[in-house]
Image: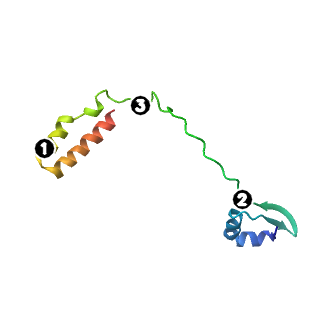
Amino acid sequence: MPTVNIHEAKTHLSRFVDQAAAGEEILIARAGKPVARRVALAPTKPKPRTLGLGQGRFTWPEHFSSLHADAIQQMFESGKRDQDVNTARILLVFTTRSC
């Protein structure tokens, strides 16, 4: 296990961090006496997410899947695509913000 002084550790920190990530340990010394050991952190496994944390915190209208169905159907049938797409975006934003 190599030993480096504090000045060298500060000067070449990024190199020593890369070495630690690769699994190498280095002792850091002050006035020739080891004061710290630089090692890589043990990998942590993410905890599984708990389902249902938002249950009861959000409400959706019962008829959400058919909101503005007539207007959307009319847009598909009319042929005025650019204006209708913008209108659909406005309807969607208004609907999601008012829920």
Distance CA(mark 2)–CA(mark 1): 62 Å
The N terminus, quarter of image: bottom right
Distance CA(mark 1)–CA(mark 3): 33 Å
Res 32 quadrant in image: bottom right
Can you identify the residue that label 3 sits on? Answer: 58
Could you tell me which secondary element the residue under label 2 belongs to?
Answer: loop
Which residue is pictured at 25% across the width and 43% down the height?
90
**Does 54 sit left or right of 40 as displayed?**
left
Q: Which of marks 2 and 1 is nearer the N terminus?
A: 2
Q: Which amino acid does label 2 sit on?
A: Ala
Q: Which of marks 1 and 3 is nearer the N terminus?
A: 3
Q: Which of marks 3 and 2 is nearer the N terminus?
A: 2
Q: In the picture shown, does residue 4 fall above or below 79?
A: below
Distance CA(mark 3)–CA(mark 2): 42 Å
Instruction: Select label 3 or label 2 by which is in front.
Output: 2
Q: What residue type is labelled 1?
A: Glu
Can you identify the residue that label 2 sits on? Answer: 40
The reply to whether the C-beta atoms of the residues labelled 3 and 2 are less than 8 Å apart is no
Q: What residue type is labelled 3?
A: Phe
Instruction: Select label 1 or label 3 by which is in front.
Output: 1
Neighbour tally class for label 1: few under 14, some 14-19, many 20 plus, Cα within 10 Å:
few
Could you tell me which secondary element the residue under label 1 belongs to?
Answer: helix
Q: Nearer the viewer, residue 36 or 54?
A: 54
The C terminus, quarter of image: top left
**Does 7 sit left or right of 89 as displayed?**
right
Q: Position of residue 78 (x, y in %)?
A: 11, 45
Q: Position of residue 75 (x, y in %)?
A: 16, 43
